[in-house]
Structure formats: structure tokens, C-alpha cells
Image: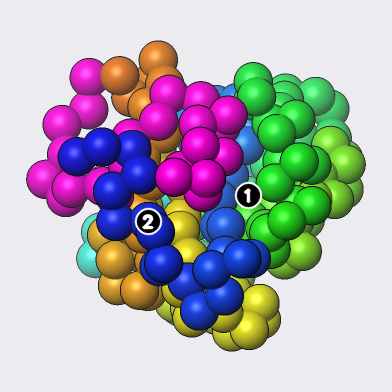
Amino acid sequence: MSPAAGLSGSTADADRPALLFDMDGVILTGRESDPVVHERALDDALTDYGLTVSKPQRTALSGYEYTEAFADACRAAGVAPEPFYTAREVHSARRIAARIEAGVRGVAPGADVLATLADEHELALVSNNYHRAVETAVDHHGLDAFAVSRGREPGVTGFRRRKPNSYYLRETLDRLDADAGLYVGDRETDLLAAERAGLEGVFLRREHNAEAELGTEPAAVIDSLAGVEPLLDA
């Protein structure tokens, strides 16, 4: 499919289409947060609860995802699974935000195009990362081109609203008073969420996902953020 295919006339206001972007691997360097963040956040949560757990329990409790294994390990430790998961995630969000402020996560190449795009279009940042981390990235890196920035809430509900769920994309479109546009991401889950939200999914292919095979066809494939503007002019 050509880069501009499927994009023309895709928004309610063709002169100012909504442009939504993923954060990790798209606007910020690094495809995801370091897993050690969740390990250390688990230590924080265990301290909060005054708990000591076995090695197998720790393995189940330190993963990012909310799983049956996580819930079972919580019950074995004598704590309610969902509140404990939220507690651990709050610490993960705090630690990720601190790493951004410390300069561990920088702005990805080509992000200077955002200022130009914002002159003519409504821009939004929508991520599976925690809302605190997204807000910190916007503030720390001066990403004021984004009219709206949205990450997920800590806890099971926020976990279940992650992409490919379209919840946060649809919420953001409501805030922009838009019902269509395009979403730039670097994972197939971004394309699926975009499709479910009524957006055109644009796949940004960089070194970290150069060999990724897609089961969902994007409206366009670009190799830099500079590739967004030509799509709009086509």
C-alpha cells in the first residue's frame, strides 16, 4: 500500500485532522520501560505491606502483566490481588517517571517535526505507559506540541484498557472533539487499537522493529516521524 493510501478525507475536518502518536519507541527512545523497574517496584510494595515472599512467589509477582499466577501468588501471601497489583504499579509509575527525569529516556530522532505539525493539526500522545510517566515525559522534554497527552491508570482496570483495546484512543478523540484521524505507532497492537477507534494506523518502522511481521495492514508505513507530513499533503 502506498504511504498516502487510505488517509485522504479520513477525518471529520480534512483541514485539521487529529494526529495521535504512541510514546515508547515513537516519541521517546526505548521501546519499553526496563523490566527492572517492576522488580524494584515490587520491593517497594512488599515493604509497604510488610511482606516477605518465597522465590517462586516473587517471580510471579514481579511480572508486568496481571495474570492468574500473579493473583494466586498474592492469595498465597495473604493479600488481595487487585489492590496489591495497583500498589506495585503506582511504584512502577513513580520509578519510570524518575528515570525520564534523570535522562534515561530521551526524545527520539525526528521529533522536532511535531512543532510544525501542531501548527496545522491537533496532536495527541496516547500510550500504554502509565499516565504519570506520560505527563512527566511531556513536561521534562517540553513536548508542548501535544494538545492532549494520555497514559493508562495504574491497576487492573488500566491494564485491561491497554492497546489493542481502543479505550484511551477513543477517550482522546472525544477530548479533541474529533471522530477520525491517524495514529502513529510501532507495534501491531497500535494498528489494531487504531482500527477499533476508527483511526488510520500508521506503522513507524525503526531499528527495534525492522523485522516485525504484521498481521494487520497499516494505512501507511514510514521510517521516521518526518514521514507523517507527506501523508497529509497527499
Q: Is residue 98 magenta?
A: no
Magenta range is 211-234
Q: Quadrant of the C terminus?
A: top left
Identify the residue under disc 2.
7
Q: Quadrant of residue 222?
A: top left
- Residue 232 visible in rendering: yes
Residue sitting at x 84%, y 27%:
102
x, y percent for residue 122: 69, 63
Residue type at mark 2 is Leu
Q: Quadrant of residue 207?
A: top left
Frontmost residue, 158 versus 77: 158
Frontmost residue, 29 versus 129: 29
x, y percent for residue 184: 46, 47
Q: Residues within 10 Å of mark 2 (few under 14, many from 20)?
A: many
Residue sitting at x 56%, y 57%:
20
Q: Which of the two discs, 2 and 1, sits closer to the camera?
A: 2
* Residue that protrudes farthest toward the front in the picture: 234
Frontmost residue, 19 versus 48: 19
Earlier-in-chain disc, 2 versus 1? 2
Q: Is residue 228 magenta?
A: yes
How far apart are the alpha carbons under marks 2 and 1? 37 Å
Identify the residue under disc 1.
92
Residue type at mark 1 is Ser
x, y percent for residue 230: 51, 37
